[in-house]
Image (cartoon, rainbow, N blue to C red):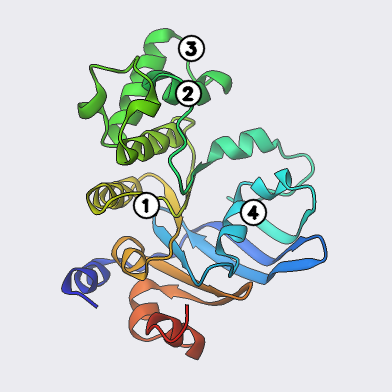
């Protein structure tokens, strides 16, 4: 493993306060079981990475946290997931409100076919988060600045978001995700469509955002997981095999399957 990765792991703090608590979560797509009894605590104000081979259940579990699996007719989720002590599968819970509290950034940048400004303003507007045009302007500027994009786009806010480069589009999607003032940001392979320079910018951004948000990233890149996360969870064949401090998972895993995956014996 390179020196940068080891250095990043050495400075990673050990974190404890959970924002999300999941117990015995199972997911079924029709007759096929995709997740088996996943129990994990996701700490507040930290980056937690989900790693594992393709089809192992990490994205499936990520989509449970903002109830994206609800959009799949044959999907069924059992078990319990709490956000700040509240059961997110409670029948009284407003799913729209949940998705404002749990933002999501997808694998492929997907800006709305609207202006840069409108991409960020859309969520706060539909959730009624601002009281005036000037308050909305301030929030849009704040989110673009937090997403390290404002300097690059400040003079073209009313141009289409789709006209930006891939890396800029992904940072616009991050600005859009934080505009609804979420507690949690889910990132599903957010850098897989980006070049190394854009990837480095998004990783730097994650490091800054964790001061205010709980971040979960699904990644195929073990180097990325080691660089950006404080906690790592390893999934295999729909099971959560092991979870722990990132340094411990990468240098001294408890499970042989984790060791085999990290050393490249399968994956």
Between 219 and 62, which is closer to the camera in this rendering? 219
For marks 4 and 3, the one nearer the N-term is: 4
**Which mark's residue is nearer the viewer, 1 or 3?**
1
Between 178 and 3, which is closer to the camera in this rendering? 3
**Which mark's residue is nearer the viewer, 2 or 4?**
2
For marks 1 and 3, the one nearer the N-term is: 3
Residue tagged 1: 191
Q: Residues within 10 Å of mark 1 (few under 14, many from 20)?
A: many
Measure how far apart labels 1 and 3 are at the Cα level. Answer: 35 Å
Residue tagged 2: 113
Measure how far apart labels 2 and 3 are at the Cα level. Answer: 25 Å
Whether pointer 2 and pointer 1 mark residues with C-beta atoms closer than 8 Å, the reply is no
Q: Which mark is residue 249?
A: none
Q: Residues within 10 Å of mark 2 (few under 14, many from 20)?
A: few
| Label 4: element kind | helix
Q: Which mark is residue 131?
A: 3
Measure how far apart labels 4 and 3 are at the Cα level. Answer: 32 Å
């Amino acid at each position: 493993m390179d020196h940068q990765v080891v250095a990043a792991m050495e400075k990673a703090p050990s974190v404890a306060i959970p924002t999300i608590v999941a117990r015995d979560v199972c997911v079924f797509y029709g007759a096929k079981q995709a997740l088996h009894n996943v129990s994990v605590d996701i700490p507040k104000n930290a980056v937690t990475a989900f790693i594992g081979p393709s089809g192992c259940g990490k994205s499936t579990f990520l989509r449970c946290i903002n109830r994206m699996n609800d959009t799949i007719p044959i999907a069924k989720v059992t078990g319990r997931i709490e956000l700040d002590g509240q059961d997110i599968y409670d029948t009284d819970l407003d799913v729209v409100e949940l998705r404002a509290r749990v933002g999501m950034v997808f694998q492929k940048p997907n800006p709305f076919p609207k202006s840069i400004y409108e991409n960020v303003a859309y969520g706060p507007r539909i959730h009624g988060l601002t009281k005036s045009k000037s308050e909305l302007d301030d929030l849009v500027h704040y989110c673009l600045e937090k997403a390290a994009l404002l300097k690059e786009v400040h003079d073209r806010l009313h141009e289409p978001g789709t006209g930006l480069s891939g890396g800029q589009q992904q940072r616009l999607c991050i600005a859009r995700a934080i505009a609804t003032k979420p507690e949690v940001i889910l990132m599903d392979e957010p850098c897989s469509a980006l070049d190394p320079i854009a990837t480095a910018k998004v990783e730097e951004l994650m490091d800054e955002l964790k001061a205010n948000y709980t971040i979960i990233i699904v990644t195929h890149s073990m180097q990325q997981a080691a660089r950006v996360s404080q906690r790592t969870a390893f999934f295999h064949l729909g099971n959560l095999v092991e979870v722990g401090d990132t340094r411990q998972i990468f240098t001294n895993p408890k499970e042989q399957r984790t060791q085999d995956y990290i050393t490249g014996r399968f994956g």
